Amino acid sequence: MTWEQWQDLLAARTHPRRLMGLDEVGNMAAFLASDRASGMTGTTVNLTMGSLDD
């Protein structure tokens, strides 16, 4: 299996049928480190785009 085939397989298992980009992961990390996320405590953030249930 090629890397592209592996990525296609993973993407097919998500709700939007695509993988999350590195920029999206970075944006979430920046949000979680900011004061805007100060109300979030004891929270798990699921970045699998729906491929794994919470």
Image (spheres, grey):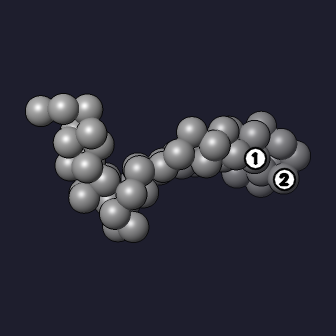
Could you tell me residue 44's position as x and y percent? 52, 46
> In the image, what residue type sits under mark 1?
Phe
> In the image, what residue type sits under mark 2?
Arg
Residue at mark 1? 31
Q: Nearer the viewer, residue 43 or 33?
A: 33
Q: Name the residue: 25% across, 32% down.
A: 3
Q: Name the residue: 25% across, 58% down.
A: 12
Observer-side mark, 2 or 1, equals: 1
Question: Is 18 left, or right, of 9 in this rendering?
Answer: right
Q: Secondary structure at mark 2?
A: helix
Could you tell me residue 26's position as x and y percent? 66, 39
Q: Which mark is residue 12?
A: none
Neighbour tally class for label 1: few under 14, some 14-19, many 20 plus, Cα within 10 Å? few
Could you tell me residue 1's position as x and y percent? 12, 33
Q: Name the residue: 39% across, 67% down.
A: 16
Residue 41 in sight in this render: no
